[in-house]
Amino acid sequence: MTDETQVPQSDDLPEQLRVRREKRARLLADGVDPYPVELPRTHDLRQIRETYSDLAPDTATGDVVGVTGRVIFLRNTGKLCFATLQAGDGTELQAMLSLNKVGADALSDWKSTADIGDHVFVRGEVITSRRGELSVLADEWRMAAKSLRPLPVAHKDLNEETRIRQRYVDLILRPQARETVRTRAGVVRALRDSFHGRGFIEVETPMLQTQHGGATARPFVTRSNAMSMDLYLRIAPELFLKRCVVGGIDRVFEINRNFRNEGSDSTHSPEFAMLEFYAAYETYDSMAVLTRELIQESAQAALGTQVVTLASGEEYDLSGEWTSLSMYPSLSDALGSEVTPETPAELLHKHAERLELEVDPKLGHGKMVEELWEHLVGDQLYAPTFVRDFPVETSPLTRQHRSIDGVAEKWDLYVRGFELATGYSELVDPVVERERLTEQAGLRAGGDDEAMRLDEDFLRALEYGMPPSGGVGMGIDRLLMALTGLGIRETILFPLVRPE
RNA sequence: GGGCCGUUAGCUCAAUUGGUAGAGCUGCGGACUUUUAAUCCGUAGGUUCUGGGUUCGAGCCCCAGGCGGCCCA
């Protein structure tokens, strides 16, 4: 325990911080531990609420309980004090301290030391007040943990920055913040349940990698002192999960963090949770069905419905079959002019110019098709939609379509205009894969620092033979966005922010 | 990377044309034995994000920077 004399007499602190430090010091001086190690709690607040859900006003149960909670409201009168206690899950219960039950000293201690924000213990009879409020009528109270900072006022919203920087305060004050944490946990748990029910094995693959790959993105670089080498934080687990499939883990999934060295906005975070799963003898068609089922089962398990209510209040229907459309035909329709994998890049640039869409003039056919498609079609999509058959050149790890030249067996799942998941019939021919990665390495040498590297060990694994497989990647944060309508920074408990 | 907006008390926000920086809640002192954001009386609380500049005088105008938000690339 800190010696009281070591507590600085901080005259320069704002009054409200100073006062609480003085109250802590006073407790210590009186021989009372403001942070006791243990309290004789008999029930949590939820248990009390559930057990005594139907008491009439002004009822005395005769049952004595010991409860704890954070004081969130105080209504002190002369000889009878009320406090609303809040449990971590947001459950509230009223504590009443009356002169004739706790005595003059305890009541006066309460008034002079208990503040909003403090954790307190109250022992007493379960009763209802005359107004019918379920309460514990104290015959004893103790400080459980003295709060040294005033809680922000509960009746005005904290500004968004403070909510993110001090998420602990956000969680105390805002039911929606607590709800989001529970929903996220429920979704992740539902995903795992769904996978386990379908014979998938969960693995954890390296997040520190000597070579990054599996996506086109810039990595974070870090340094191993012991190995005297640079390491990369992974941008995707794909190449390791495929090694798993080569090794016979035929149905495999991983839920873990990816890191991409980019800025953040309402749909991007440099650190984000990713689900990837691979299954031997499946294709992008069957994986699309599985992906839909996973999302629907998550919604059902975490929210109890597949017609979810978004933060805006509107309803969003995830139930039933979802539409799918093909990239080249849908782009052709929107453009009013046929685009195929043979359409030269120059012509696509002319289309972009006509649409006053600014693009990098160096972009080739594949990226131009995707740019135009996103602008003309993707931005308009609202209902869940699988967009199928992407240009081969922008999907180096994807299998060539079995019957359409120049197109890859890849889909993207769009929900309310943003990309939620992407699925493939995986490329498993090691010779073609080597050609594709060699091309990427060439782009890299040419200055494209998002292009992929040649991963010899990955190619060696493929050379042992990978069964035909389907694979899917889905952002967990984005799944939460889809189910709740929240921005990505609300779905992540502690998003990256610059230091204050 | 560019543009625009914001940054004021513990929290949420005001402040006219450049002229003593205010309110609500919170805090502190007091009254009150059935309150529900209790009420009533009294009272305190400020490096106006930081650093420069202009001016008799700057929260406000100018310059540079920090942090945040939105839009664009």
Image (cartoon, coloured by chain):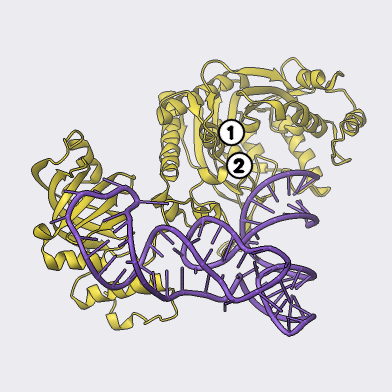
Chain colours: A yellow, B purple
In the drawing, does residue A304 fall left or right of residue B49?
left
The amino acid type of the residue labelled 1 equals: Gly
Three-letter amino acid code at the position of disc 2: Ala
Q: Is residue A405 visible?
A: no
Q: Secondary structure at mark 2?
A: loop
Q: Are marks 2 and 1 in contact (CB under 8 Å)?
A: yes
Chain letter of mark 2 equals A
As drawn, is A248 to the left or to the right of A40? right
**Circle 1 residues within 10 Å: few <14, some 14–19, many ≥20:** many
Above-or-below relation of A88 to A345: below
Q: B12 or A145: nearer the eye?
A: B12
State the residue in front, A157 or B67: A157
Residue located beneath label 1 in the image: A473
Residue that numbered label 2 is attached to: A236
Which residue appears at 18% of the width and 75% of the height? A31
User: Where's residue A417, x and y in %?
Assistant: 66, 31
